[in-house]
Image (cartoon, rainbow, N blue to C red):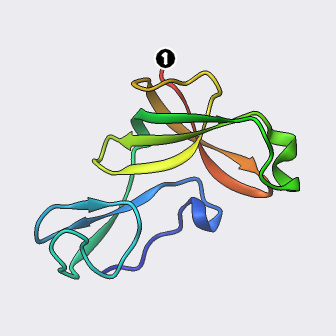
Amino acid sequence: MSEPPADWTKGEEAITYQACTSCGHVQYFHRAFCAACGESDLRVLRASGKGRVYAASLVCRAAAPETRAHVPYNILLVDCAEGFRMMAHGENDLAIGDSVIASFRPFAGKLVPFFARTK
């Protein structure tokens, strides 16, 4: 298994995922093994940032003092073009089925993926 390149979790403007070279399964959460077949031969790839909204939830009450300035904010589940699903932030007017593309914005002191409707 290759070492993951820097992504948004390390402050870089990138989303990475793993692809199993044995069975082809893709997974967003980096693991030492394939969640589908158990093999450990995984490639780390950079995602395109394209996807479709699977679910959306508008947060209207701050969960912590550092998120108060961001209220209201939208939390999404996005089915990414590469075949994995991830949770991220997005424009407040996004709805299920919208086609989206990722950029990156600061949120509560961290850089996070932020999805907007594709034009």
Image quadrant where one finds the N terminus: bottom left
Q: Position of residue 60 (x, y in %)?
A: 75, 35
Which residue occupies 46% across, 35% down?
A: 55
From the viewer's perspective, is 16 left or right of 74?
left
Instruction: Tell me: residue 95, above or below residue 36.
Output: above
| Total marks placed | 1
Query: Quarter of the image holding residue 19?
Result: bottom left
Disc 1 target residue:
119
From the viewer's perspective, is 53 left or right of 94?
left
Q: Position of residue 67 (x, y in %)?
A: 81, 49
Query: Quarter of the image holding residue 116?
Result: top right
Instruction: Tell me: residue 2, above or below residue 80.
Output: below
Local packing at callout 1 (Cα closer than 10 Å; few below 14, some 14-19, many 20+) is few
Which residue occupies 76% across, 33% down?
A: 72
Residue type indicated by callout 1: Lys
- Nearest the viewer among 60 and 70 is 60
Which residue occupies 61% across, 21% down?
A: 93
Instruction: Tell me: residue 53, above or below residue 69.
Output: above
Query: Quarter of the image holding residue 11?
Result: bottom right
Which residue occupies 58% across, 59% down?
A: 8
Q: Position of residue 101 (x, y in %)?
A: 48, 34
From the viewer's perspective, is 9 left or right of 45?
right
